[in-house]
Amino acid sequence: MDMNKIEITYKELAEKDSRDYLLVDIRNEEAIAYGKIPGTMHIPGEMLESRQGELPKDKPLILYCTRGIFSRECAEKLRGKGYDAYSLEGGYTGWLLESMKEEQAQDGEDHTKAEEIEKSIRKKFHKQLFSKFAKAINEYKLVQENDRIAVCISGGKDSMLMAKLFQELKRHNKFPFELEFLVMDPGYSQANRTVIENNAKLMNIPITVFESDIFDAVYEIEKSPCYLCARMRRGYLYSRAKELGCNKIALGHHYDDVIETILMGMLYGGQIQTMMPKLHSTNFEGMELIRPMYLIREEDIKHWRDYNNLHFIQCACRFTDTCTTCRTDGSSASKRMEVKQMIAKMKKTNPFVEGNIFKSVENVNLSTIIAYKKNGVKHHFVDDYDEMTGETEN
């Protein structure tokens, strides 16, 4: 390779034999959960120095991050230490766009890819995905006759799968209901918006896109910008869904999101709460939020994604889009990722820990609770302690 330049393009990479170089993904754990280039080694950027011994000096190293900004800096540092290092131009996002162009050219107009994806849901992943989707809908009464549901698509694996599962449910059509596939663009870069639109076309999802300026509004917020962004997004989604005649919005939160939320509430919020399968909106009368992926495991979603060779964007806000989250220095790691790793560690010694966390909010015994809130009113055990008799000690 040409040591006079630091960047290598996707086209140049495609022309080389993959055995002649090593691809290194330097994004954080949260980012690679959304997808990575096949055949890559993962070393978070801030750990490159401490793990240099794992990197060969006898072949070129091609580093990539989200957009190719941080990876260029890291490649330059490695060159200073004797490595033949390069940065992939455009990063993971650039690679994703180029690979999508190739896939669309091969797929043509016959939608064979969409058909393969749909077949995988009906056959290979029926038990793990569609059965659990249908079970949540039935168990929690999420879809009713004559509902008009706005299926909210962020562009990630969860919401895209949710859209396909709703299409499959519609095929069975046991009772009439309608769907709107809604995408809100809160200020995506053109590259990320293109990824969402390309995936929707590839998967045969008829999306309706509307724009907002949420990213601009929260970019300068120092305290909890992600929380504010999420709240604002939901408000915009409710509003647009109602304009379209919908009475419900559907979000793509899954089983792992639920159990992580339970632990996060206990460990960081000092409270016992869960992510509910459905909620009435307090600000939009007659509107409801539903979570039909409630019983689906994230591992199965990833398996479905990889089986179909699909690639999705992360949150894609300005922070991730400019490689801010490539720099995982520990202090910036999300609380959700910390809890996710904690659960994975506990599972090694207790394989039932995930199910136990989920069931814990279904088996609450109010007689053994110091205090609880209902409809905003706090109830304390001493309030009626003298009236309680014959309780079993624990």
Image: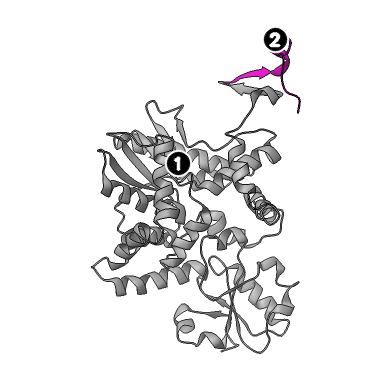
Residue at 51% x, 72% y is: 37
**Rendering quarter of residue 258:** top right
Q: Quadrant of the N terminus?
A: bottom right
Can residue 369 be seen here? The reply is no
Q: Residue 88 sits in which quadrant? A: bottom right
* Disc 2/disc 1 C-alpha distance (Å): 40 Å
Q: Residue 188's x, y, as percent? A: 45, 54
Q: Which residue is mark 2?
A: 387
Q: Are marks 2 and 1 in contact (CB under 8 Å)?
A: no
Task: Work out whether mark 2 precedes mark 1 in sequence or the reverse, and give the earlier one.
Answer: 1
What residue is shown at x 71% (from left), y 18% (from top)? Answer: 381
Q: Which mark is residue 291?
A: 1
In the picture as drawn, the residue positioned furthest to the top comes out as: 387
Q: Residues within 10 Å of mark 1 (few under 14, many from 20)?
A: many
Helix, strand or loop at mark 1: loop
Q: Quadrant for the C terminus, please.
A: top right
Residue 35 image label: none
Membership of 384 in magenta stretch: yes
Residue 33 visible somewhere in the drawing: yes
Instruction: Indicate whether 154 appears above or below 38.
Output: above
Give me the residue at 42% from left, 54% from top. 127
Task: Give the extent of the magenta segment.
Answer: 376-394
Q: What amino acid is found at the position of numbered circle 2 in the picture?
A: Glu
Label 2 neighbour load within 10 Å: few <14, some 14-19, many 20+: few
